[in-house]
Amino acid sequence: MMNHIKPDYTGIGLRAPHYAQVLEERPSLGFLEVHSENFFHAGGASLHMLQRARECYPLSLHGVGLSLASADALALPHLEKLASLVERVEPALVSEHLCWGAIDGEHFNDLLPFPHTSEALQIVTERVERVQARLKRQILLENLSAYVAFRDCDMSEFDFLAELVRRTGCGVLLDINNLYVNACNFDFDARQELARVPWDAVGEIHLAGHSVGELCLIDTHGSRVCDEVWALYREAVALGGPRPTLIEWDTDIPALEVLRDEAARAAAINREQTCPA
């Protein structure tokens, strides 16, 4: 089994409509990524599929439910399920969103932002340390798409992430589409924010599509990556070098060939940086 993802590898998010085709055809991809929570049950066809895929590709587990920034205590049952899955499939990468999504026993179907304050930094630091100790490995934390901003912030999102990296040794999952969506929604320069990214800690990049709403851009993962995000990705690779890059597509999932085409475009940008003309 392979469990290493080279910096210039590109992959796709593996979703149920493509399970059988990927296992049968074994397309040329650098790695696969799945949502961790979809495989928490110990048995069943889905986990069997994941183990088969793991024999063919490096694997990345991407979580949406740890709620690291919640005012609630760390969800230990959730962490134990994640730890069991990590031990079973030995992924190359494990990542989580830097957000909250549950409080007082209520779970929300969203990844919610929080104020980037010193108090929040202390809470998240303690939780990241506990998670990494339990998993016995580094985790990557993803920057978030958001639709509200907080007045009472001590630092920017990427300054918060950089300090979290310094304190815990965690890594960063840089979502270029999330950065672009936030830059448009809150009117800041995405390229300036790239300079705040702690590049030495970036272990993976996500690319995805979004939709244009009446009042803002919405991170839907339901379309091809737009030209502006591709341009931002090219700048990111020029600034920080190639990183394992994933095409995310979670709604209106297209034919597998479309995902492979998007991954190939990312790979071409990586090659431009690695082997300039």
Image (spheres, rainbow, N blue to C red):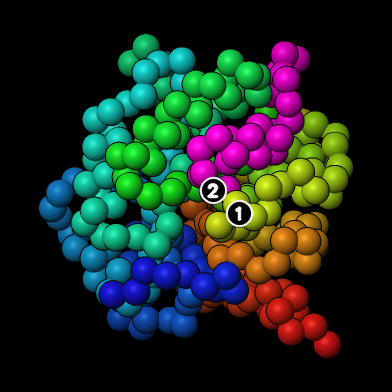
Q: Residue at x 21, y 56 (%)?
A: 88
Mark 1 crowdedness (10 Å alpha carbons): few <14, some 14-19, many ≥20: many
Disc 1: which residue: 202
Look at the picture and state if 21 lies above or below 127. below
Is residue 235 left or right of 266 when viewed as pictured?
right
Q: Is residue 86 magenta?
A: no
Residue 249 in the image: state x and y as whole percent.
Answer: 53, 57
Residue 154 in the image: state x and y as whole percent.
Answer: 73, 20
Disc 2: which residue: 171
Is residue 106 left or right of 202 when viewed as pictured?
left
Question: Do tag 1 and tag 2 residues touch (Cβ < 8 Å)?
Answer: yes
Q: Residue at x 54, y 21 (%)?
A: 122
Q: Secondary structure at mark 1?
A: strand
Is residue 85 left or right of 225 when viewed as pictured?
left
Residue placed furthest toward the left: 43
Using the image as rendered, state which of residue 235 and residue 133 is in the foreground. Answer: 133
Q: Which mark is residue 114?
A: none
Task: Tally the marks.
Answer: 2
Residue 21 in the image: state x and y as whole percent.
Answer: 35, 75
Using the image as rendered, state which of residue 216 and residue 159 is in the foreground. Answer: 159
Q: Residue at x 30, y 35 (%)?
A: 79
Look at the picture and state if 162 lies above or below 262. above
Query: Bounds of the magenta span?
Result: 148-172
